Image (cartoon, grey):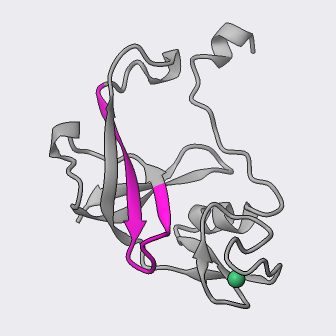
Amino acid sequence: MSISEAALLPPVPVPDEVSRPFWDGCRRKELLMQRCASCQRYRFHPREMCPHCRSMAAEWRPVSGRGLIFSKVVCHPPVLPAFQDRVPYAVVLVELEEDPNLRLVGNVLDVPPDRVRIGSPVHVAFQEISEEITLPQWRLA
Ligand SMILES: [Zn+2]
């Protein structure tokens, strides 16, 4: 694949040792969040050390997949070639109901960006983009 051909494809997450349980859960259509086994607080993105208490002990817990749109932006041209067929589209930051500090970035599927409003309830919708990667996206509740 040439560099110009690669520019036409959207970037794809690359799981590593720490984030692999998150991506494996998404592939099974299960939203898992990393939680500290010492102080019990959730964290996202996945990482080895708890940002609250510095414990290295962590576990993966299923969460509801329900949340509220905390913030949004609408992308308009110019965008990378891989995204030019999608504009305009909304990118949202969703606050999960389990913890207001647990926020994921994604898109709201199947609605025009002007229907996407801060404060709206959403639920997770898994979008398979390759054999290895399924993205957690969102639908209006
Ligand atoms: Zn902790």
Q: Residue at x 50, y 69 (%)?
A: 102
Residue 38 location (% of width, % of height): 73, 91
Is residue 50 or residue 115 the one in the foreground?
A: 50
Is residue 122 or residue 73 the one in the foreground?
A: 73
The outermost residue toward the left is 115
Residue 48 location (% of width, % of height): 80, 68
The number of discs equals 0
Q: Residue at x 26, y 45 (%)?
A: 110
Displayed-image quarter of ligand 1: bottom right
Is 91 contained in the magenta span?
Answer: yes
Q: Is residue 73 left or right of residue 59?
A: left
- Using the rendered view, name the quadrant where residue 86 is placed: top left
In this picture, is 127 found above or below 50? Answer: above
- Using the rendered view, name the quadrant where residue 58 is placed: bottom right
- Using the rendered view, name the quadrant where residue 40 is placed: bottom right
Residue 62 location (% of width, % of height): 55, 81
Q: Is residue 93 left or right of residue 50?
A: left
Is residue 20 or residue 129 the one in the foreground?
A: 20
In this picture, is 37 found above or below 20? Answer: below
Q: Residue at x 57, y 17 (%)?
A: 8
Q: Is residue 108 left or right of residue 118?
A: right
Is 135 contained in the magenta span?
Answer: no
Q: Quadrant of the C terminus?
A: bottom left
In this picture, is 28 found above or below 83? Answer: below
Q: Quadrant of the N terminus?
A: top right
Q: Residue at x 22, y 44 (%)?
A: 111
Magenta residue span? 88-104
